[in-house]
Image (cartoon, grey):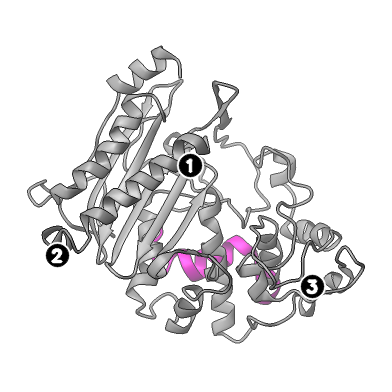
Amino acid sequence: MPTAFARLAHVICIVAASCATQALGADPGKPPPADRLTASLDAAFQLVQDAVAQGEIPGAIALVAKSGQVVREAAYGLCDVENKTPFTLRTICWIASITKPVTVAAAMKLVEEGNIGLDDPVEKYLPEFKEQKDKEGRHPIITIRHLMSHTSGIQANPPTRPSFFFEQDFLGRKIADIASEIAKTTIEFEPGSQARYSNAAPYVLARIIELRANRPFHEYVQQTILEPAGLRDTYFIIPPSEAERVAVVYRDARGERVTFFRFDPTWKVSMTLPDGGLFSSPREIAKFLQIFLADDGQVLSQASVKAMRTVQAPGWGLGWALEEEGLLTHSGSSGTSAWADPKTGVIGILFCQLQNTDKVSPLQARFRQAVRDAYSEANPDAAKK
């Protein structure tokens, strides 16, 4: 990392922190007094602050919530290095693949209504998939459940997606076009026989959502998931008026940090990337995660929550990655990560906007472990807060 950048990150390591419990729906711009801070969280947040000060990442937002209340949140460093714009709690981040469980949750609303079934064949709704074959020329049956759990056998990436997802030509296409292209690809393994991560499968699921809901994918997600959950500052299509709040996404390549994504308010978006097109903030995504901890039937039925939290294949539920003791988690290629612990009721979120798994993934893992340590049975005073 260039020394000049490290010095800049250290000087402009701005911390906007909320250290007392605060409802998820409260205004993040008005943090309460810091007189009830869970001191044991200091180590977790110090990890992020140090990573920014040392130039490992340009900036970040971190959040910890428990039982539906924000315990602590902080913003550090820069969301736009070139313009020296600091991260704030209201900075909008590209959450990338954390979009996937949101897409699955929207499909689960159709399951609740009886409009689709988890074990329905994809070809029931998309006839072009009747012609799809595997490497031996056989025609395996892919189900809705397979699409949701990375067990479909569909290849890793959409066949026509460019390396830069936000090219105007790609954004101007339709989900229906992408699903049809996927139907022409070869199934890589027997559906249900193994789990292999697929960015392509969500496009097939999103097309089925459009057909069964009789409206564009992003509108259905907005109406059935985002609005009911109170996510009023989460977007597939960012309003031009919010352009100044969108973080730049950087990428480390060959020892150089370059710009991967800078939002352009002139983009015309027709297709809204069901595998990774959402823009949001930690406080917003905490509300989504809380759906799966509260399990109160307000946004998703208890049956839907149970299904998404149930292991479908090693490491995967429906939409969520599942770890020990039912921990729900997902990450995004933009440097985002989010998790929820049903055992403790704790949510942890760390949003960087840097594509560098060698630096970001270890930081995310250390942050999560430090938060979990703070609320472990070995620290009963923190666990009660």
Pick whichever of labels 3 and 2 is earlier in the sequence: 3
Identified by mark 2, the residue type is: Lys
Identified by mark 1, the residue type is: Gly
Pick whichever of labels 1 and 3 is earlier in the sequence: 3
Residue at position x 63%, y 63% in the image: 217
Residue at position x 46%, y 73% in the image: 309
Left or right, 127 with reference to 30: right
Q: Nearer the viewer, residue 68 or 88?
A: 68
Pick whichever of labels 1 and 2 is earlier in the sequence: 1
* Residue pointed to by mark 1: 335
**Mark 2 neighbour density, 10 Å: few (under 14) some (14–19) many (20 or more):** few
Q: Which residues are magenta?
A: 209-232
Q: Nearer the viewer, residue 338 or 96?
A: 338
User: Which secondary structure is most common in the magenta stretch?
Assistant: helix
Q: Residue 6, image x and y in percent?
A: 37, 19
Q: CA distance from mark 3 to mark 2?
A: 50 Å
Residue at position x 82%, y 61% in the image: 180
Q: Are marks 1 and 2 in contact (CB under 8 Å)?
A: no
Residue at position x 60%, y 68% in the image: 149
Q: CA distance from mark 1 to mark 3?
A: 34 Å
* Residue pointed to by mark 3: 126
Res 246 visible: no
Q: Residue 375, image x and y in percent?
A: 22, 59
Question: Mark on residue 384?
Answer: 2
Identified by mark 3, the residue type is: Leu
Above-or-below relation of 274 to 312: above
**Mark 3 neighbour density, 10 Å: few (under 14) some (14–19) many (20 or more):** some
Above-or-below relation of 171 to 6: below
Res 371 visible: yes
Left or right, 311 with reference to 75: right
